[in-house]
Image (spheres, rainbow, N blue to C red):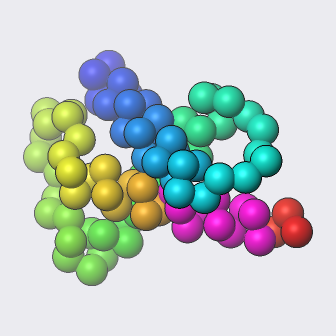
Amino acid sequence: MAHYAAWLVLGLIAGAIARWILPGEEKGGWLVTAILGILGALVGGWIAKTVGYLPPAEPGEWIPDLKSIASATVGSIVLLAVWKWIRR
């Protein structure tokens, strides 16, 4: 259960930072921000692991480190930018 809570916290942090960097008139609140952040964490984590920035996760480790937050935030910014581009 702690693993899911960590994804939610990581998603909230990454989504909030992404919305702070790319502000706009998107509505949604904390739930949409968390979903954006979680999806961004998936995208950013995949990219970061592919290029060797993030090592494989240790089993049982659920507290996100700064590299995880950074890659999740970059992924969230990319998703938010694509979403804004599509909605034009």
Q: Quadrant of residue 59?
A: top left
At a point 20% along the width and 34% down the height, the residue shown is 63
Left or right for 44, reference 56: right
At a point 14% along the width and 36% down the height, the residue shown is 61
At a point 41% along the width and 39% down the height, the residue shown is 13
Left or right for 80, reference 67: right
Q: Is residue 43 above or below residue 68?
A: below
| Residue 80 falls within the magenta-colored stretch | yes
- Residue 85: x and y in percent read 77, 71
Q: Is residue 27 visible?
A: yes
Total count of labels? 0
Magenta-tinted stretch: 76-85
Q: Quadrant of residue 30?
A: top right
Name, please, the residue furthest toward the top.
1
Q: Is residue 39 above or below residue 62?
A: below
| Residue 39 falls within the magenta-colored stretch | no
- Residue 51: x and y in percent read 27, 80
Q: Is residue 52 above or below residue 73?
A: below
At a point 85% along the width and 63% down the height, the residue shown is 87
- Residue 11: x and y in percent read 45, 40
Name, please, the residue furthest toward the bottom.
51
Q: Main secondary structure of the magenta part?
A: helix
Name, please, the residue furthest toward the right.
88
Placement of the N terminus among the 4 image quadrants: top left
Q: Is residue 38 visible?
A: no
Left or right for 38, reference 36: left
Q: Quadrant of residue 6?
A: top left
Placement of the C terminus among the 4 image quadrants: bottom right
